[in-house]
Image: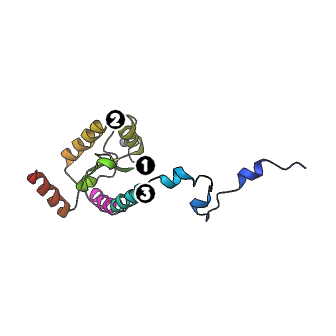
Amino acid sequence: MKRSPIKRSQTPLSRNTPLRSRSVLKTSVAAAERPKSTLRAIGKKGSAWIKVRKELKKRFEWAGITTCELKMRGCWFNDGLSFCHSKKRRKMQDLDIWRVCLGCLHCHGILDEKMSHEEMEQTVENIIEKRGLLVPPLVLQQIQRNQDGS
Ligand SMILES: [Zn+2]
């Protein structure tokens, strides 16, 4: 019997295999030179976001906002909901992480892919302006203090 060529590619990336063993070859110069700080930065912002998100969820539920606020054509209403930021992550400053609206996957996709950063910010900020900023009181104070200061 011929040895099946499929066998080889079937080798699963086994569940417990550490990522680094996936490809020894690629651990060449390019991979080694990739800045490690990128990952770390994402990690830092990521973990901050987990906390903020938890708080936002509470605030939004309290305010009774449980469906998409963007309501664009083809809106999924309450399917695939997530928070949409007014600014791209890279451009966010400390308190911008709180400036969000709730969006379904469909509308969030339009925001991210079809709009310019300016349009995206404008759209989310319009929603925030109409319903008020949903953040914990302490954060609101901080934001107001910053706005007065600038
Ligand atoms: Zn929607």
Query: SS of the residue at dot 3?
Result: helix
How far apart are the alpha carbons under marks 2 and 3? 27 Å
Identify whether 115 is placed above or below 14: above
Q: Which residue is labeled 3 in the image?
A: 39
Q: Which residue is mark 1?
A: 80
Q: Position of residue 96 (x, y in %)?
A: 25, 52
- In terms of depth relative to the viewer, which is nearer, 57 or 100? 100
Name the disc covering residue 115, or none: 2
Does the stretch in magenta take in 60? yes
- Measured in 3D between alpha carbons, the distance from the residue under mark 1 to the one under mark 2, in whole angstroms, is 20 Å
Q: Residue at x 61, y 60 (%)?
A: 21
Q: Secondary structure at mark 1?
A: loop
Q: Position of residue 81 (x, y in %)?
A: 39, 50
Which circle's residue, 1 or 2, is located before the other in the chain? 1
Q: Is residue 120 visible?
A: yes
Q: Is residue 33 above or below residue 111?
A: below
The CA distance from mark 3 to mark 1 is 26 Å
Q: Amino acid at mark 2?
A: Met
Looking at the rendered structure, the kind of residue marked 1 is Gly
Q: Position of residue 40 (x, y in %)?
A: 40, 60
Mark 1: few/some/many CA within 10 Å (<14, 14-19, 20+): some
Amino acid bearing label 3: Leu
Image quadrant assignment for residue 43: bottom left
Find the magenta span and give its range.
51-68
Asked if the residues shown at circle 2 and circle 3 are in contact, with their CB atoms under 8 angstroms apart, the answer is no
Q: Is mark 1 within 8 Å of ligand 1?
A: no
